[in-house]
Amino acid sequence: MAIKSSKPDIERTVSPRQQEDEIISEISLRPRRLDEYVWQAQMKEHLSVAIQSAKIRNKPLEHILFYWPPGLGKTTISTIIAHEMGSAIKSTSGPAIEKQSDIISILTSLTEGEILFIDEIHRLRPQIEEILYSAMEDYQIDIMIGSGTGATSVKMDIPAFTLIGATTRLSNLSNPLRDRFGNVMKLDFYETIDLARIIKRSFSLLGLSTLSDAAILSVAERSRWTPRIANRYVKILRDYATVGKPIENKDECEAIFEGFGVDSYGLDILDRKLMMHLMESFHGRPVGLSTLASVVGEEVATIEDVVEPYLLQIGFIERTPRGRQITMKWEEYMRKTE
């Protein structure tokens, strides 16, 4: 059976990707019930209705596909759904399912009503997807008996289950697979005030409830609208408090952030390095992605998937037909920080 694995693209404090030491430690900070889940109000309402309907009908929940950037709670909400349905959940990822036998082993080991969570589902191989088609629609899989010209296909029943897929790249998902999901839901970035609620709850769970509201808001403002980053900062500040460093007020928290290179916008050293090259090396002119990656010293995929999404969201850079370019908003930011 394929086992879920998670490896960061790059070891950055502000990376929304889940890092290895968070796979276990972050679980204690995750909500377990739908009413504890902050933000995504429309999605929560829709899920609540779908879950109640499935329980009344005594049927599995319709298959669900979540999409949007990493760190917004796709794994968390999947675990909550399983808890609300009273079902077990089995987790894996697209890259971990290498062979047809892997997905067949997973599907045949499911129990009635169990939830199968596949992260990075857009990275499934086409031959794996084909097995999922009939599994999702008819709760059957095709098993090949024999080999060569004498091989025959036999349909095998599997327990009724719910597939929850998560992807950061909806466009990379094939149309036949996407169309088999009864619910396709987009998760949005979090508002700062909602991140503050998450941060306050996390500090309380870790036994630190003396932080001022201003300090909590300061943490939220640096969290790049992403709960995973917010909880990572909570644990960093917890470590400072454990060794005797004060963290209760805003100035104390901001001094710690300054110490490991995260500014009031949540920008880290790599973000600023990229922006300064755009401004000073290319004098604000558009720059091709491969050229920019070469100058910064990172892979193109790292710039495209890890660094620039947030810079685009906050309006510091823009994509043009000729390449990436700084904006007036970045220039204003620089004037304020000089």
Image: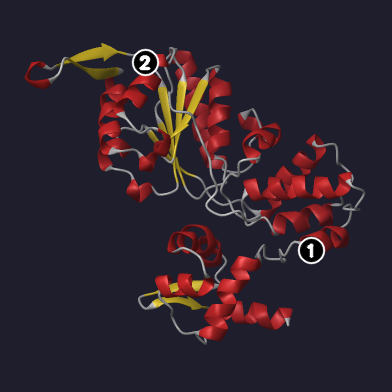
Residue named by callout 2:
108
Identity of the residue drawn at 7% across and 20% down: 149
Residue 203 occupies which quadrant of the picture? top right
Mark 2 lies on a secondary structure that is helix
Where does the image place residue 239, in percent across and percent down from the top left? 82, 46
Q: Position of residue 160 (x, y in %)?
A: 37, 16
Q: Amino acid at mark 2?
A: Thr
Q: By what rule are the colours in the image chosen?
A: secondary structure
Q: Position of residue 12 (x, y in %)?
A: 62, 56
Locate residue 70 relative to residue 300 in the image: left or right.
right
Give the crowd class for mark 2: few <14, some 14-19, many >=20 residues within 10 Å: some
Q: Residue furthest bottom?
A: 283
Quadrant where the C terminus is found in the figure: bottom right
Amino acid type at mark 1 = Gly
Q: Is residue 158 left or right of residue 223?
A: left
Residue drawn at point x = 61 percent, y = 30 percent:
34
Q: Quadrant of residue 291?
A: bottom left
Q: Which mark is residue 259?
A: 1
